[in-house]
């Protein structure tokens, strides 16, 4: 019989992952609002995704990652993540692959799912971490869907299917964290800081420049809301 704690963490990770296709499904909805409001809404959700990613970096990945690493090792891991994503971004641009926001979403989701498993194995609050991951994944799924859809390569149905399959990475990574990495906290810390550096690079390079709209000052508030959601989950 399966360990109830394992089943519990798998369910939490799966729900958090399914927020990605849920965000994609919202992005499928078009023509509901007037054009001006629709455009502001889309830019606002883009900013919300950026705010959620920043909250993951500031409130989860960096603080938890630095617990078990020296300052030097922390900075090296963080810098390597940024450099790694710069190389990935260059490769995506040269090969005209529209997946920078998809890469950001996964770089957030995978290490946090691992952390979800290690937290559960060590008796921590995995539910709150799972909630934080879910609220981050929703706007990120929305933004990654729009990026892929705009390329004209994938249909809406195929993108949502891809996101649904990617949601299965959550339980898989959580199980790896639970059974394999809970005792290797230094490794988990390095992974989290590497991801944090990559996410911050991606936000500054790809997401933040797309938030601004001419003659509109509302969309950046989406970023504030996204970060505030992360603060709420962190404080709980």
Image (tube, rainbow, N blue to C red):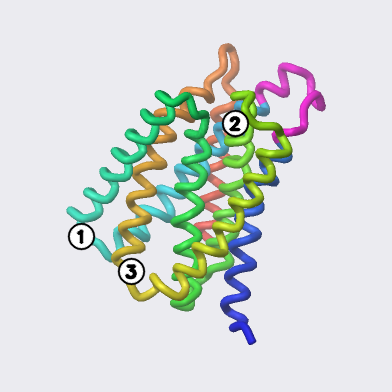
Q: How crowded is mark 2: few (under 14 residues within 10 Å), some or many (20 or more)?
A: many
The residue wearing badge 3 is 185
Residue drawn 51% across the image and 35% down it: 101
Magenta-colored stretch includes residue 25 = no
- Image quadrant where one finds the N terminus: bottom right
Q: Find residue 79 and report its horizontal and vertical position in percent.
A: 26, 43
Give the spatial CA distance, label 1 vs label 2: 39 Å
Mark 1 or 2 closer to N-term?
A: 1
- In the rendered view, does 174 fall on the left or right side of 94? right
Give the spatial CA distance, label 1 vs label 3: 13 Å
Residue drawn 70% across the image and 32% down it: 155
Residue drawn 54% across the image and 68% down it: 126
- In the rendered view, does 31 fall on the left or right side of 52? right
- Image quadrant where one finds the C terminus: bottom right
The residue segment tinted magenta is 27-40
The residue wearing badge 2 is 148
Q: Is residue 159 above or below residue 17?
A: above
Secondary structure found at label 2: helix
Q: In this view, does 96 lie above or below 21?
A: above
- In the rendered view, does 224 fall on the left or right side of 58? right
Give the spatial CA distance, label 3 vs label 2: 35 Å
Mark 1 or 3 closer to N-term?
A: 1
The residue wearing badge 1 is 70
Mark 3 or 2: in front is: 2
Q: Find residue 9 and report its horizontal and vertical position in percent.
A: 58, 70
Mark 3 or 2 closer to N-term?
A: 2
Residue drawn 36% across the image and 28% down it: 90
Q: In this view, does 215 lie above or below 115?
A: above
Q: Residues within 10 Å of mark 3 (few under 14, many from 20)?
A: some
């Amino acid at each position: 019989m399966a360990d109830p704690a394992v089943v519990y963490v798998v369910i939490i990770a799966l729900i958090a992952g399914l927020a990605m296709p849920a965000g994609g499904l919202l992005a499928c909805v078009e023509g509901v609002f007037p054009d001006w409001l629709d455009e502001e809404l889309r830019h606002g959700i883009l900013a919300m995704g950026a705010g959620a990613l920043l909250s993951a970096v500031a409130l989860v990945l960096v603080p938890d990652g630095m617990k078990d690493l020296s300052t030097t090792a922390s900075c090296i891991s963080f810098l390597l993540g940024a450099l790694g994503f710069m190389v990935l971004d260059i490769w995506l641009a040269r090969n005209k692959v529209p997946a920078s926001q998809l890469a950001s979403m996964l770089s957030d989701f995978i290490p946090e799912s691992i952390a979800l498993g290690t937290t559960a194995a060590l008796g921590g609050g995995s539910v709150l971490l799972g909630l934080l991951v879910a609220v981050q994944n929703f706007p990120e799924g929305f933004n990654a869907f729009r990026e892929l859809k705009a390329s004209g390569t994938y249909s809406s149905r195929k993108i949502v299917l891809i996101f649904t399959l990617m949601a299965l990475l959550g339980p898989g990574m959580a199980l790896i964290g639970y059974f394999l990495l809970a005792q290797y906290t230094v490794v988990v810390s390095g992974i989290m800081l590497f991801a944090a550096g990559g996410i911050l690079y991606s936000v500054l390079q790809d997401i933040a420049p797309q938030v601004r709209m001419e003659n509109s000052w509302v969309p950046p508030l989406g970023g504030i809301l996204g970060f505030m959601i992360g603060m709420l989950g962190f404080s709980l």
